[in-house]
Amino acid sequence: MSLAERQGASAVDTDTDTDSDIDEVAAAGFSEALGSRQLKALTVVIAAYNEEEAIESVLRSMPAEVCGLGVDVLVVVDGADDGSASVARGCGVLVCDVPVNRGQGAALRLGYRLARTHGARFIATMDADGQYDPAQLAAVMEPIVAGRADFVSGSRRLGAAHTTDRVRATGVVVFGRLISVLTGQRVTDPANGLRAMRAEVTAAVELRQPQYQATELLIGAALRGFRIAEVPVTMYQRRAGTTKKGGNLGYGARVGRVIVATWWRERPRGRGRGRTTRQLS
């Protein structure tokens, strides 16, 4: 099956071999377009699926430098059928346009690989929908640059959340407590879209989830002994469009399965190695 023939495939019916093939083709195309250029020290990876109405304002707000580090922005377009890729290119950022919609987790995993391969020392993530302010990248990067942490996640509970979905807000609390129990580390926000890490963290942690990858990465990093921290950030209402996560009940059930599956997979490696999660103001 050619890559073009897979455009109708979804995250649930893409097998491991096919998924790997898609990554290889996309990575080769990106590398060819990039040429000999190396990415700047900090690469911000953004997964985008049908976000043409929101992504431009996010990209136009990106700082050129964070904590003294030069910044590149890499948008991985996840099988979008709108103008997300062309809008991103118009903003002058790097784009990897994957014609198959596989899920945010798969797009971020590919973005991490591209960033590492092409020289990024640090990787940050941000959502394409405008729910996080690029000005707060410095807050999540500072503990890493200062040598106090390897992985830093933003926390809306330590900061603020200008959202109205109380069910989702309750889920953040419940799942944060569950992860805290499973990892032995205090986690207040288990699925924040604004986070930063040393590039090697993304290579050391096994990433399988096509969705909900923020939670998988957080648990994996904690159980593999990386220094974890949380910092206060603000979460806003999305600027345009609608969420791709589905209804609250199904979303909660899927996240719960990811938490348990990741913990079960990682727990032998994590025994006695976890380090305390710190909340940094």
Image (spheres, rainbow, N blue to C red):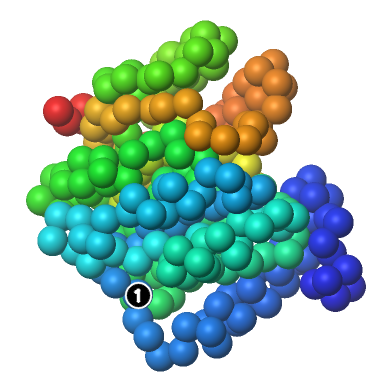
Whether residue 280 sits left or right of residue 169 in the image: it is left
User: Which residue is at the front of the view, 121 or 228?
Assistant: 121
- Residue 67 vs residue 153, the one in the foreground: 67
Judge by depth and name the residue closer to the eye, 28 or 200: 28
Could you tell me residue 107's position as x and y percent?
59, 56
For the point 50% across and 13% down, which residue is it? Answer: 164
Quadrant holding the C terminus: top left
Residue 42 appears in the picture as rendered:
yes
Quadrant containing the N terminus in the rendered view: bottom right
In the image, residue 115 above or below residue 240:
below
Q: In which quarter of the image is residue 72?
A: bottom left
Amino acid type at circle 1 is: Leu
* Label 1 sits on residue: 39
Q: Residue at x 60, y 62 (%)?
A: 85
Q: In this view, does 132 lie to the left or right of 255?
A: left
| Residue closest to the far bottom | 36
Residue 247 image offset from top left, x and y in percent: 70, 21
Identify which residue is drawn at 44% across, 34% down. Answer: 131
Residue sticking out furthest to the left? 146
Q: Up-down: is 66 above or below 219?
A: below
**Within-10-Å neighbours for mark 1: few <14, some 14–19, many 20+:** many
